[in-house]
Image: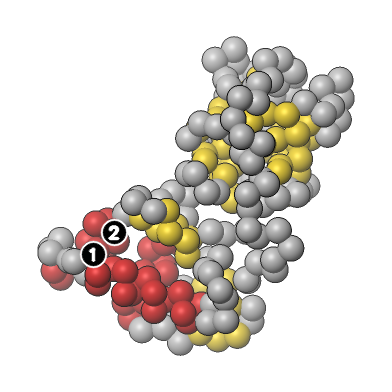
Amino acid sequence: MTRPLKPRTSRLAPRLVVENGLSKGDEYIVRKPVTLIGRNESCDLIVSDPLVSRRHCQISWDGVYCTVEDLGSTNGTFVNGQQLTMAYALRPGDRLQVADVVFHFADPQATLVGHKWPKLKIERTTKRVSVDDELVELSTKEYALLLYLDEHSDRICSKEELGKAIWPEYKGDVFDYQVESLIKRLRQKLEPDAEESHLVVTLRGRGYRLIKP
């Protein structure tokens, strides 16, 4: 393994810490919107192992959450022993494995440490939604919003985009307050007792995103 990222940012920045091998203890600061991991010299985090693909996986950071995604690697990317089949939002304590190298993910600013992540289940055939096995009754627009956020959970969805997707009959003539109001109602139904939403989060000035464990 070569070229570790030198910590020039705050100690509060999210990071990957190597757990094994000769580089054990090395830290890699996640400071860019996209951190590319692989064997190629152009990667941000280089893992010099023949089992690692040239462009193996990437971590996207939106300023709040880090999401890891496999890039079609030959031998796969694993989180907590499970092979990734879709984008995954990393949580503090998660173990990311690329070939034989295991990273511990740490995020000192995370507010979800010790928090039991709500278990969201969407049954598309019956349009049933449940959180922690409790059925949630949603209006047609609330369900459409949740479904759209779920289908695009790998990125941030802007208010303009949501407006067009949820109210196609308005042909783009949707006000911000309509989206904000619908988001608020959806949050209240999904997590009525939460001080802050852990499922539908706001990225100030950018939009909304559904966080999935």
Can see residue 101? no
Residue 139 appears left or right of 53: left
Residue 104: horizontal and vertical position, in percent?
A: 76, 40
Which residue sits furthest front? Answer: 10
Mark 1 Cα shell of 10 Å, populated few (<14), some (14-19), many (≥20)? few
Residue at the image position 57 percent from the left and 59 percent from the top: 212
Which residue sits furthest right? Answer: 21
Q: Which residue is mark 2?
A: 159
Residue 184: horizontal and vertical position, in percent?
A: 39, 74
Residue at the image position 56 percent from the left and 65 percent from the top: 198
Residue 31 appears left or right of 101: left
**178 lies above or below 52:** below
Can see residue 134? yes
Which residue sits furthest top? Answer: 41
In front here: 189 or 122? 189
Label ID, residue 74? none
**200 lies above or below 8:** below
Amino acid carrying label 1: it is: Asp
Residue 172: horizontal and vertical position, in percent?
A: 15, 61
Q: Which residue is mark 1?
A: 176
Quarter of the image holding residue 1? Answer: top right
In front here: 124 or 13? 13
Q: Secondary structure at mark 2?
A: helix
